Image (tube, rainbow, N blue to C red):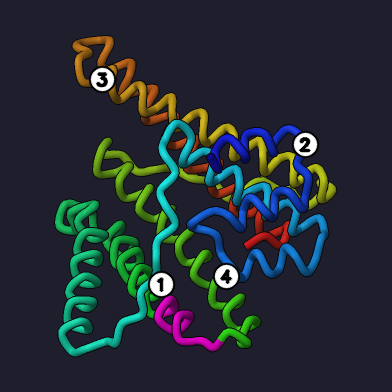
Amino acid sequence: MAVEAIKAWLNDKDYEKGVAIYNSLSCCNKRLVKNFRSRKNARNKLTLEYELKKYYEKHQHKPTPPKPVIVQTSITNDTQHQEKSKLEARAKEEANRVLYSSLPHDLKPKHRRAVQLFYDMCDLKQVLNGLADEEEEKARLIQIQIRQKDTEKKLLWQELQYYNKHKQYLVTEDPNDFSKLTPEEKTKQLYNLRSYVTKKTKRVEGWYQELETAQGNEALKLETKITKAESSIHQMQINIVELKKQLGIE
């Protein structure tokens, strides 16, 4: 299984073996694979490790889905209509994460921005899918734009959902100053923050489960811990975005 292979790979982190494992994943990005194979450098090693860890954390203790068989079909008007309906349904689902009318006036522009980012990403993916294989540089730049917009969108929804759940504003600060750190120190800091976010998120999920049956003071204590932890997680993710910018990781 891919999960077991990645778990074993994390002990030695052999680059070529890691590329082979990543290439075997059903969700692998073929352009990334090509980039990994053409250039073995610190940045690619970091990206490879991130992609494999991301897959491992998502799929551990879960069966690996079979690699899908892609069947080429001609696009009819009916198909286009179905795709449009799906897109509209997904956009509505995005917007319904938080009821627009329930937000205070100063948070509504962030809601509109989050929904617009979703449409922007859909447009970019459409352009990406229409590129020829040899247009690798264009594809790479579009993928960077998609990831940047997705990161911004996720942070906005976190802020809106925080208000929706707790009826409090999520107080955030500017990213920490990492300018004096060496690239190695920044990389270590990045992985530490990612690890903290994963652990703290699991802890919060456990507190939410406890909250379902808690009463009185115990419930109040859990709510306080949850609001503080979610605020801390959001701030960590802002710092993660800043570190990735400084390291040149999109």
Q: Is residue 15 left or right of residue 117?
A: right
Q: Secondary structure at mark 1?
A: helix
What residue sits 34% from the left and 43% below the top?
169
* Circle 2 residue: 12
Q: Position of residue 112 (x, y in %)?
A: 29, 67
Q: Amino acid at mark 2?
A: Asp
Q: Is residue 218 left or right of residue 44?
A: left
Image mark for residue 211: 3
Q: Is residue 10 magenta?
A: no
Mark 2 nearby-residue class (10 Å; few <14, some 14–19, many ≥20): few
Q: Earlier in the sequence, mark 3 or mark 4?
A: 4
Q: Position of residue 222 (x, y in %)?
A: 33, 19
**What is the quadrant of the C terminus in the image?**
bottom right
Image mark for residue 121: 1
Q: Amino acid at mark 4?
A: Ile
* Circle 4 residue: 144
What residue sits 82% from the left and 45% below the top?
184
Q: Position of residue 247 (x, y in %)?
A: 73, 57
Q: Secondary structure at mark 2?
A: helix
Residues rendered magenta in the picture: 124-132
